[in-house]
Image: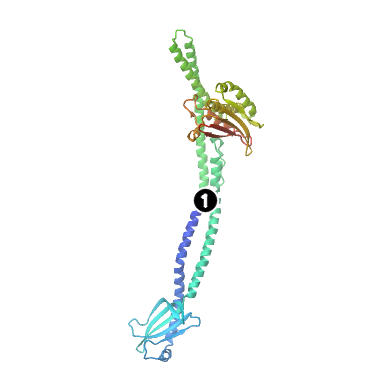
């Protein structure tokens, strides 16, 4: 998951948590405010009632003074309020006000009320005053407020989530541009773009600067490494040539027995193999250092025909059938020698790792607008483990085969030089297909 999505989700979750807390606390907050308002109203009504209270009014409220349970009740038309005055025994906690919520049945209808209870003594007689206010409207109002607020909060959550996503996308735009232009598209240090990335964030400008500095150091080390390989390879060729001349001169000595001759011949073979390795390393070094021109017109049909003629005897010895299915005419500009080596190495592998009486077929065509050449054999095939390292230097598919393991490494270097993509599909004991996907436009280093 990308960091912009993680940040947007994090912000959304934090807001959702805040909304949940508000949602849970909302009833308490509303009830405290509403109850305080209702309590003040009930206290005001109690004060008015007590201030105007006299014995005549009490007698009017309670007609039978001898009955201590006699009560007086007065209700509003819609049962939203009531007032009850009752005779009670004299209590010690007189002239104290109590509030509570109770359900009362008034004229057959049960409702919840906020009730003020007030105990007082008047002329040695205890009384209890109850003034109630209906909570039905308060509950309805609380529900409406909660519903309205949750809608508002959800809308705010969605709007802020979209705003965060857009804003985070805007903030991270330089970051993705750095990844795309300075990391993903860079295959080698020489192709690195040092153009500063425009960013309002100081962090991304610093990241861009550090990447430029790091790539400069890498390019310098990369250059030194390739120069070292080139110098060492050149220096090694001279002693190899001297040793080869000495061994060849020794072979002219007629006093040597057969055992000595065999050992010298083996040494010469080893020197030849070492010389091939050095020359291949030199070739890779020159390709990676862009020491070749890429301005020649290349005819793939001509290259394939020449290779078929060169390998004819070798394929006949193993009874391998070669089939050229190329039909397209495609103009490509590059280095003819390197392209010849690239296809030569692939065809060599197709012969080397093929089975006797096997098949090799070469065909071309277009895939998504890109010209391709595929080389298919019916040989040993490779496992996934081998496919992951076939382009590594000195990697060999089978230890039973001759070679130094540099053929495919050279092929990859040549393909990279010409911006050609190599795809490999292989199945064990069924065969392998190497496909060369050429670039849409002619591009060279």
Where residue 80 sits: x, y (%)? 48, 79
Please identify the quadrant where the C terminus is shown: top right
SS assignment at label 1: helix
The number of discs equals 1
Q: Is residue 261 visible?
A: yes
Q: From the viewer's perspective, is residue 84 above or below residue 286?
A: below
Residue linked to disc 1 = 4
Where residue 252 sits: x, y (%)? 49, 9
Q: Residue 317: which quarter of the image?
A: top right
Q: From the viewer's perspective, is residue 130 above or below residue 2?
A: below
Density class for disc 1 (Cα within 10 Å; few <14, some 14-19, many ≥20) is some
48 sits left or right of 152 in the view: left
Q: Is residue 239 visible?
A: no
Q: From the viewer's perspective, is residue 140 above or below residue 287?
A: below
* Colour setup of the view: rainbow
165 sits left or right of 370 in the view: left
Q: Residue at x 51, y 39 (%)?
A: 213
Where residue 68 sits: x, y (%)? 36, 88
Q: Residue at x 42, y 84 (%)?
A: 84
Q: Nearer the viewer, residue 345 or 120?
A: 345
Q: Residue at x 54, y 32 (%)?
A: 432
Which residue in the rendered view is the most extreme toward the top? 255
Q: Nearer the viewer, residue 374 or 269?
A: 374
Q: From the viewer's perspective, is residue 121 above or below residue 38?
A: below
Which residue in the rendered view is the most extreme toward the left? 92
Q: Nearer the viewer, residue 267 or 172?
A: 267
Where residue 214 sits: x, y (%)? 50, 39
Q: Residue 47: which quarter of the image?
A: bottom left
């Amino acid at each position: 998951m990308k960091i912009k999505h993680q940040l947007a989700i994090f912000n959304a979750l934090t807001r959702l948590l805040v909304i949940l807390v508000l949602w849970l606390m909302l009833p308490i907050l509303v009830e405290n405010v509403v109850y305080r308002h209702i309590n003040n109203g009930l206290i005001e009504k109690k004060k008015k009632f007590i201030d105007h209270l006299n014995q005549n009014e009490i007698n009017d409220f309670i007609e039978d003074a001898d009955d201590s349970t006699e009560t007086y009740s007065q209700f509003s038309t819609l049962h939203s309020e009531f007032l009850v005055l009752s005779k009670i025994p004299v209590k010690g906690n007189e002239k104290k006000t109590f509030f509570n919520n109770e359900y009362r049945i008034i004229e057959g209808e049960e409702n919840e009320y906020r009730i003020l209870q007030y105990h007082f003594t008047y002329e040695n007689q205890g009384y209890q005053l109850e003034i109630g206010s209906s909570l039905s409207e308060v509950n309805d109002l609380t529900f409406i407020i909660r519903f309205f607020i949750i809608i508002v909060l959800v809308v705010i959550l969605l709007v802020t989530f979209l705003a965060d996503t857009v804003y985070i996308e805007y903030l991270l735009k330089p970051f993705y541009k750095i990844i795309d232009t300075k990391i993903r598209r860079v295959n080698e240090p020489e192709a690195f773009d040092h153009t500063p990335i425009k960013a309002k964030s100081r962090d991304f400008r610093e990241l861009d600067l550090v990447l430029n500095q790091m790539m400069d150091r890498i390019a310098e080390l990369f250059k030194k490494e390739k120069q070292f390989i080139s110098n060492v390879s050149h220096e090694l060729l001279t002693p190899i040539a001297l040793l080869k001349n000495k061994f060849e001169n020794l072979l002219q000595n007629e006093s040597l027995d057969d055992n000595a001759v065999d050992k010298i011949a083996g040494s010469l073979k080893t020197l030849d193999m070492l010389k091939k390795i050095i020359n291949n390393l030199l070739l890779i070094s020159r390709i990676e250092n862009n020491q070749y021109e890429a301005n020649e017109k290349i005819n793939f049909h001509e290259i394939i025909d020449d290779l078929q003629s060169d390998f004819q005897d070798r394929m006949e010895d193993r009874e391998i059938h070669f089939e050229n299915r190329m039909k397209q005419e495609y103009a490509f500009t590059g280095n003819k020698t390197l392209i010849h080596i690239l296809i030569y190495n692939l065809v060599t592998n197709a012969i080397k790792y093929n089975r006797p009486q096997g098949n090799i077929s070469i065909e071309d065509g277009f895939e998504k607008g890109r010209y391709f050449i595929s080389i298919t054999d019916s040989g040993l095939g490779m496992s996934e483990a081998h496919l992951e390292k076939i382009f590594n230097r000195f990697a060999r598919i089978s230890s039973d085969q001759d070679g130094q393991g540099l053929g495919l490494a050279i092929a990859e270097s040549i393909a990279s030089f010409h911006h050609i993509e190599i795809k490999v599909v292989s199945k064990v004991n069924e065969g392998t297909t190497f496909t060369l996907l050429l670039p849409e436009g002619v591009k060279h280093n």
